[in-house]
Image: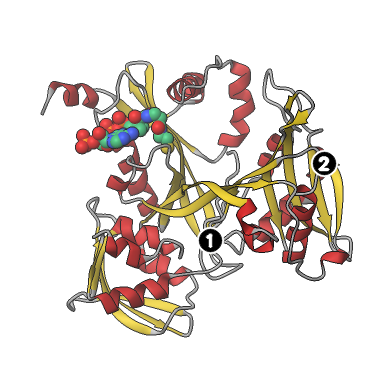
């Protein structure tokens, strides 16, 4: 073992005591390159969010040189409302630049995944800061997202009925507090991978609970769409970046949140956003990969993806439990699936039987039809990443027909939705 590795082993990985939270938060922010000094007030502000969460630190003597946070949280899986898995949500992962590449992350994450497995939690997920980090621990890129940019004004060609009944109100962020949370929860429940937002997220993001030194932003513009009964049916939050060159404007309207319960409400919000005067482009982040916007437009090339990337990475910890928890729409049939797991947490060989919209996985010694690593199955589990694409990259093996059928069985539409709260 090299001396660098031995040095890493002297570092202690353990739960963080309350009086160590300031050092823990400072270390995390420093490694994430956030410039602001952390004060006791910042810790007080964050503390309610940490209630019920597991804060882990890597300590070199008294110095915090690594941070890690996780908590149990439900995540929607394919099958529609009511289909969700309890998962281990992982966040705040850092190792100080002075202590990197000595195995400290490996120690923190393997201990956390083992503990989750022991608690009976069937899946873990996180947002990866960099793509090469988490595959080695069995995570796979499962939820994609895109940024769309629209040249404005952009007329809509198709208006789903009854768009004429939808009324769009121009409001401010603070006005969304009463109705947006329940609407978001209802919309997210039907999209695999759409992270449920905790109540306190709304106070923070709507500017109602500014942190120390922050100004309230509750007066930012927002749209609230109401259906014919007056019920909230859609929300859009945005800000504008106004720029003039002489007498010509070059203004961007940036949409940070847009969700709706019905196609009509979604179209009504777009109709409003894409026809605001003095706006030259509308940019919207965190859209699902099957976003209907281009299909709504008279000229679909006015809405172009300017970025598409992976968002959530998932890691199955109990394959039979996870497969049983999701819904299935694909072709019925059976196959033997072999899953390898280098961490020894979730590997095995099962006969999967898809019948009447559900799958039962029974352990078997029969020859496998399809085999893959746990990361590949985790990537495909939420129904968006095609198993056939992973096979084309050599990450799934088996007869082409067997792989194609399992791929069709795992697929789910609508796709995932890259939404996340500040936790
Ligand atoms: C990413 C980070 C947590 C890794 O911590 P670490 O303690 O250095 O990781 P480990 O030493 O346990 O690395 C284990 C393996 O993963 C590799 N690895 C770790 N981070 C990597 C990265 N960003 N890119 C590529 N490989 C990486 C290591 O080289 C090592 O490989 P090896 O076993 O073949 O030698 C740390 O570098 C960091 O805090 N980076 C900045 C913040 C960040 O990106 N956090 C993640 C947010 S989700």
Q: How is the image coloured?
A: secondary structure
Residue sitting at x 70%, y 61%: 298
Vertically, is 15 above or below 400? above
Residue sitting at x 53%, y 69%: 413
Q: Is mark 2 within 8 Å of ligand 1?
A: no
Residue sitting at x 41%, y 77%: 359
> In which quadrant will I find the C terminus?
top right
Label 1: which secondary element? loop
Q: Nearer the viewer, residue 104 or 158?
A: 158
Label 2: which secondary element? loop
Q: Gap in Å between the C-alphas at discs 2 and 1?
A: 36 Å
Vertically, is 278 above or below 60? below
The quarter of the displayed image where residue 280 is located: top right
Q: Nearer the viewer, residue 323 or 173?
A: 173
Question: Residue 309 at what x, y percent from top left?
Answer: 46, 47
Q: Nearer the viewer, residue 402 or 115?
A: 402
Image region (quadrant) for ligand 1: top left
Q: Is mark 1 within 8 Å of ligand 1?
A: no
- Whether residue 49 is visible, yes or no, is yes
Question: Residue 269 at what x, y percent from top left?
Answer: 77, 54
- Frontmost of labels 2 and 1 is 2
What is the crowding at mark 2: few (fewer than 14 residues within 10 Å), some, or many (at least 20)?
few
Q: Which residue is label 2 attached to?
A: 277
- Whether residue 262 is visible, yes or no, is no
Is 306 placed left or right of 278 in the picture? left
Q: Which residue is label 1 attached to?
A: 192
What is the crowding at mark 1: few (fewer than 14 residues within 10 Å), some, or many (at least 20)?
many
Question: Residue 314 at what x, y percent from top left?
Answer: 41, 53
Residue sitting at x 41%, y 75%: 409
């Amino acid at each position: 073992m090299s001396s660098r590795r031995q040095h890493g082993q002297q570092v202690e990985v353990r739960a963080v005591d309350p009086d160590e939270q300031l050092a823990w938060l400072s270390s995390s922010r420093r490694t994430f390159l956030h410039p602001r000094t952390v004060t006791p007030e910042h810790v007080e502000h964050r503390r309610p969010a940490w209630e019920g969460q597991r804060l882990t630190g890597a300590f070199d003597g008294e110095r915090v040189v690594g941070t890690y946070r996780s908590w149990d949280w439900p995540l929607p899986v394919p099958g529609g409302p009511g289909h969700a898995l309890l998962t281990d949500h992982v966040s705040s992962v850092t190792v100080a630049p002075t202590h990197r590449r000595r195995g400290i992350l490996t120690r923190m994450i393997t201990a956390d995944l083992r503990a989750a497995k022991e608690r009976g939690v069937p899946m873990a997920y996180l947002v990866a800061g960099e793509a090469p980090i988490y595959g080695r621990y069995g995570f796979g890129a499962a939820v994609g997202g895109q940024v769309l940019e629209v040249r404005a004004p952009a007329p809509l060609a198709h208006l789903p009925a009854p768009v004429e009944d939808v009324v769009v109100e121009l409001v401010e962020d603070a006005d969304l507090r009463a109705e947006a949370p329940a609407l978001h929860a209802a919309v997210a429940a039907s999209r695999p991978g759409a992270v449920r937002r905790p109540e306190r997220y709304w106070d923070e993001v709507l500017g109602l609970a500014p942190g120390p030194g922050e100004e309230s932003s509750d007066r930012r513009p927002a749209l609230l769409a109401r259906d014919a009964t007056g019920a909230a049916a859609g929300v859009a939050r945005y800000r504008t970046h106004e720029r003039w060159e002489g007498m010509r404007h070059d203004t961007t309207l940036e949409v940070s949140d847009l969700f709706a319960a019905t196609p009509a409400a979604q179209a009504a919000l777009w109709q409003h956003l894409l026809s605001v005067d003095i706006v030259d482009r509308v940019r919207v982040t965190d859209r699902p990969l099957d976003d209907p916007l281009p299909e709504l437009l008279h000229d679909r090339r006015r809405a172009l993806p300017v970025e598409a990337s992976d968002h959530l990475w998932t890691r199955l910890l109990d394959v039979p439990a996870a497969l049983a928890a999701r819904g299935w729409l694909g072709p019925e049939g059976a196959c033997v699936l072999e899953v390898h797991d280098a961490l020894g947490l979730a590997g095995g060989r099962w006969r999967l039987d898809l019948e009447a919209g559900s799958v039962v996985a029974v352990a078997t010694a029969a020859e496998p039809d399809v085999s893959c690593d746990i990361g590949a199955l985790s990537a495909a589990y939420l129904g968006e990443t095609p198993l056939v694409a992973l096979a084309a990259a050599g990450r799934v093996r088996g007869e082409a027909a067997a792989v194609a059928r399992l791929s069709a069985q795992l697929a789910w539409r609508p796709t995932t939705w890259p939404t996340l709260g500040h936790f």
